Image (spheres, rainbow, N blue to C red):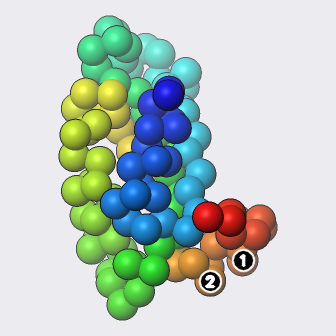
């Protein structure tokens, strides 16, 4: 399982995510100090995630849930994250694709 698949699996399991998209942006940061040793420093990822657990939570609270869920990966296989945390009903509207089946 590659890192993007691992991120997706963790978010589905820990956040009961209804939809997850992970984009590996590591190639855009090849000269970045944190990318000099890609095997030990981790990659750069953009993550879109929809979860019912986000209902009634501020963006910062949603991001904390994601960071807590990925705590084992951050600093190891993940160097940087750009997050887009959505409610399930926002997913199709913002992403333009239907929520993925379970």
Q: Position of residue 27 (x, y in %)?
A: 55, 21
21 sits to left or right of 17? right
* Residue 11 in view (yes/no): yes
Q: Are marks 2 and 1 in contact (CB under 8 Å)?
A: yes
Residue located 43% across and 43% down the image: 7
The residue carrying pointer 2 sits among few (fewer than 14), some (14 to 19) or many (20 or more) residues within 10 Å by Cα, namely some
Instruction: Locate the C terminus and report the quarter of the image it occupies.
Output: bottom right
Q: Position of residue 44 (x, y in %)?
A: 43, 33
Q: Is residue 102 above or below residue 40?
A: below
How many dots with numbers? Answer: 2
- Name the residue nearer the viewer: 82 or 22: 22
Residue located 39% across and 44% down the image: 81
56 sits to left or right of 21? left
Residue 76: image tag: none
Residue located 44% across and 38% down the image: 6
Q: Secondary structure at mark 2?
A: helix
Q: Residue furthest bottom?
A: 56
Q: Position of residue 48 (x, y in %)?
A: 54, 58
Looking at the rendering, which quadrant does residue 24 occupy?
top right
Q: Is residue 35 above or below residue 21?
A: above
Residue 89: image tag: 2
* Residue 82 in view (yes/no): no
Looking at the rendering, which quadrant does residue 75 occupy?
top left
The residue carrying pointer 1 sits among few (fewer than 14), some (14 to 19) or many (20 or more) residues within 10 Å by Cα, namely few
Q: Nearer the viewer, mark 2 or mark 1?
A: 2
Residue 93: image tag: 1
Residue located 46% across and 58% down the image: 12
Q: Secondary structure at mark 1?
A: helix
- Name the residue nearer the viewer: 15 or 39: 15
């Amino acid at each position: 399982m590659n890192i993007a698949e691992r991120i997706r699996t963790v978010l589905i399991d820990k956040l009961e995510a209804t939809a997850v998209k992970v984009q590996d942006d590591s190639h855009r940061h090849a000269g970045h100090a944190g990318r000099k040793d890609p095997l030990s420093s981790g990659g750069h990822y953009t993550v879109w995630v929809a979860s019912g657990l986000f209902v009634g939570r501020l963006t910062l609270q949603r991001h904390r849930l994601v960071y807590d869920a990925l705590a084992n990966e951050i600093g190891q296989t993940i160097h940087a994250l750009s997050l887009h945390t959505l409610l399930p009903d926002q997913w199709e509207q913002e992403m333009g694709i239907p929520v993925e089946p379970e």
